[in-house]
Image (spheres, rainbow, N blue to C red):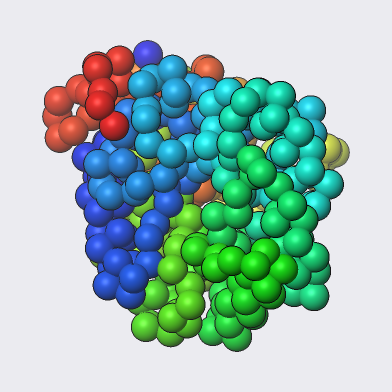
């Protein structure tokens, strides 16, 4: 059935192994981030087999999915937790990122009630202005953690690029190392992990510019897609086709390239603009904005151009295709991170697993 997302866990595993190897040359561990594919066990297993010792996800439901699938590696919540989900988180996760002393104290109480312990990574804001403490707040957070019996500080981390678009640099990574030192001073104990961001930080690894104090990264996009959105780059030493969207063509017709009549807003409140290129051959594929981030679809078939989409229809210019597309034919796309995130979330999109030409059954027993 289509639309179909073809996933190759073998390529994910190879990407993970290469990222882990290159980071490991600098003494940096890599935690796998599973939120981009809704923690699909088949893909998560590939990350673990590729060398990721810890998996992280932003949703408690996704972590629960991994536990139910039999994963025994440490699992951590990647999003700062809601107070209302602390008890549920402790059922499936070994720890979480935190950015508020009040959250730490609430987590301590939740751990006491559940008879459990939890690890936390204290998030520092080094300029992107999403979550995290300022450097001068780190010592105070350390003192709060020192007062806890069941909550243990595993490290300090930062988020770069996801909100403010700030790029990782040696300067802001050194600021993160300074945050580690201040946190350790308040804690009265060493801070083991300094997590210097995500895929966007890999360029510092590649260029040997990462400060020595940074010893961890949390990586999803590079392992899954072989791209670095922060730098607007493809990573040449990674597979970029581990995820491929296949959609079926439901109409092929020659039509004017500019709509006829007065133009108002489309179904999503935007006023579209069209270039008049005369009559062109068009195809409509049965996938739409309800399933994917349309501007994140990159056609694999030569001569195909994405013109736009409604909720359920993707309109394509196929005038320049070497072979004329036909009704019932299939068009294929690679994805950016946003498109992958939406497609894996949509239950209207079938997920198929392949290694080479063989199907991969995600329900097979696993021993991660």
Count of number-bearing discs: 0
* Residue at x 67% of width, y 64% of height: 187
State the quadrant of the N terminus. top left
The quarter of the picture where residue 154 lies is bottom right
* Residue at x 83% of width, y 37% of height: 269
State the quadrant of the C terminus. top left
Q: Is residue 90 above or below residue 225?
A: above
Q: Is residue 269 above or below residue 362?
A: below
The quarter of the picture where residue 197 lies is bottom right
Between residues 268 and 134, which one lies in front from this camera angle?
A: 134
Residue 287 horizontal/vertical position (percent)? 52, 26
Note whether residue 179 is visible. Answer: no
Residue 57 horizontal/vertical position (percent)? 54, 39
Between residues 332 and 156, which one lies in front from this camera angle?
A: 156
Q: Is residue 289 above or below residue 129?
A: above
Between residues 326 and 74, which one lies in front from this camera angle?
A: 74
* Residue at x 25% of width, y 41% of height: 49
* Residue at x 83% of width, y 47% of height: 102
Return the residue found at the far left. 357
Residue 36 in the figure: left or right of residue 290:
left
Q: Is residue 115 above or below residue 25?
A: above
Between residues 278 and 38, which one lies in front from this camera angle?
A: 38
Residue 279 horizontal/vertical position (percent)? 53, 43
Residue 63 horizontal/vertical position (percent)? 52, 29
Note whether residue 312 is visible. Answer: yes
């Amino acid at each position: 059935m289509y639309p179909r997302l073809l996933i190759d866990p073998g390529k994910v595993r190879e990407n993970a192994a290469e990222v882990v190897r290159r980071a490991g040359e600098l003494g940096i561990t890599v935690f796998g981030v599973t939120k981009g594919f809704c923690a699909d066990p088949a893909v998560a297993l590939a990350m673990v087999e590729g060398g990721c010792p810890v998996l992280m996800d932003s949703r408690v439901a996704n972590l629960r999915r991994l536990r139910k699938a039999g994963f025994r590696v440490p699992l951590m919540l990647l999003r700062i937790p809601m107070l209302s989900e602390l008890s549920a988180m402790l059922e499936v996760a070994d720890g979480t990122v935190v950015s508020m002393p009040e959250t730490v104290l609430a987590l301590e109480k939740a751990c006491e009630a559940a008879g459990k312990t939890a690890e936390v990574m204290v998030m520092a804001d080094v300029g992107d202005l999403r979550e995290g403490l300022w450097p001068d707040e780190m010592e105070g957070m350390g003192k709060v953690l020192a007062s806890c019996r069941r909550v243990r500080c595993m490290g300090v981390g930062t988020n770069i690029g996801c909100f403010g678009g700030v790029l990782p640099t040696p300067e802001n990574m050194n600021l993160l190392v300074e945050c580690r030192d201040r946190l350790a001073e308040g804690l009265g104990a060493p801070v083991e992990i300094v997590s210097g961001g995500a895929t966007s930080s890999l360029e510092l690894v590649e260029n040997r510019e990462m400060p020595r104090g940074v010893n961890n990264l949390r990586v999803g996009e590079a392992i899954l897609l072989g791209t670095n959105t922060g730098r607007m780059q493809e990573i040449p030493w990674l597979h970029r086709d581990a995820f491929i969207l296949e959609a079926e063509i439901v109409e092929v017709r020659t039509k004017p390239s500019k709509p006829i009549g007065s133009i108002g807003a489309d179904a999503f409140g935007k006023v579209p603009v069209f270039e008049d290129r005369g009559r062109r051959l068009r195809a409509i594929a049965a996938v739409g904005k309800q399933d994917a981030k349309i501007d994140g679809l990159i056609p694999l078939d030569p001569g195909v151009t994405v013109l736009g989409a409604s909720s359920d229809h993707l309109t394509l210019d196929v005038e320049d295709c070497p072979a004329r597309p036909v009704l019932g034919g299939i068009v294929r796309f690679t994805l950016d991170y946003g498109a992958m995130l939406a497609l894996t979330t949509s239950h209207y999109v079938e997920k198929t697993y392949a290694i080479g030409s063989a199907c991969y059954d995600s329900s097979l027993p696993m021993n991660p």
